[in-house]
Structure formats: C-alpha cells, structure tokens
Image: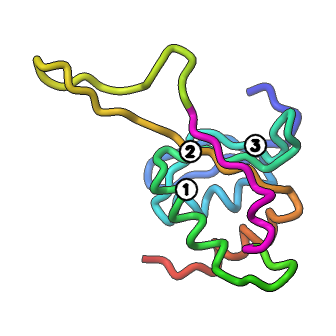
Amino acid sequence: MDTPHPQETIRHRGREAEMDKDLAPLILELWRAGWWTTNSCQEHPPTGMVWVEFERPMFALGFLDAVVPFNPETGSLWSRVESWTFEMIEPASGPRGTRHGSEGMWQYHIRLSVLFPPSDLSLVTKRMQERKRV
C-alpha cells in the first residue's frame, strides 16, 4: 500500500487490515464495538482531517453516540462537533447494491464518512477505549 503514514496491522474477528499507525487504536476499538470500517486515514488529503469511512451508516451513528455525549459547555467535544464533516459515499458508477429476485429489487449499500480534526483523535480514541463493551 502506498501511503505517507507509517502502517500497523490490526486483527479482530477474522478481519485484518493495515492502516495508519496513529489511527489503528481507534479503528480496533470500532471493530470491537461491531462498527466495521472500510477506509480511513489519519490525515486525509486534501482536508488534513482524520477520516473514517463506516461500512454502514448505523455504525457511524453508534460511534457518534459513544464519543460525543451531550455537553453544551464551551470547548467540549459536543460543542466542537460542528467543525466535523459527514459525507455519504456514492460510487462513481452509481449506487452499490445487490439485485434480488426477478422483479429487480435492489438492496443498497450506503457508506458514511466522518472527518474530524486530528486534535480530537486522542480524546475520541480514549472515549472508545473506555466505552462499555456489549
């Protein structure tokens, strides 16, 4: 893999991936929570933000609920989340999906990305590590 960042391999429940070393602890905690990811970068070009692409939108929502609890105080992560970016991933060739049955029913697969400042990475990782595991 061609990347400007040092890599580390993580493994969980039969999955294995190389990823940016600074991001590996967070991604491993996401996987332990059952929130699978498909892409990530500790400094996503051209944004310079931490980038995590979730396999399913509900995984991104679980992540946000876990790491960004309500706290309206100035300077809290909750008050800063408006500086984060959220993107729905749409493939260039059209919707990804699987065709089912003769009627042409499709089951769509939508991915959601969360981008946040690198300065929030240690707190986000800590909150995932302290999260009660189900």
Provide the residue designation for mark 1.
60
Do the numbered discs 2 and 3 sit on residues whose CB atoms are within 8 Å? no
Provide the residue designation for mark 2.
112
**N-terminal-most mark, 1 or 3:** 3
Do the numbered discs 1 and 2 sit on residues whose CB atoms are within 8 Å? yes
Q: List x then y, in percent, for residue 38.
A: 56, 40
What amino acid type is highlighted by mark number 1? Answer: Ala
Residue 114 higher or lower than 125, as above or below: above
Q: List x then y, in percent, for residue 120.
A: 82, 65
**N-terminal-most mark, 2 or 3:** 3
Residue 92 higher or lower than 97, as above or below: above
**N-terminal-most mark, 1 or 2:** 1
> In which quadrant is the C terminus drawn?
bottom left
Provide the residue designation for mark 3.
41
Return the residue nearer the eye: 98 or 70: 70
Q: Is residue 131 magenta?
A: no
Question: Which label was assigned to residue 38?
Answer: none
Return the residue nearer the eye: 77 or 10: 77
Do the numbered discs 1 and 3 sit on residues whose CB atoms are within 8 Å? no
Start and end of the magenta stretch?
A: 78-89
- Residue 88 occupies which quadrant of the picture? top right
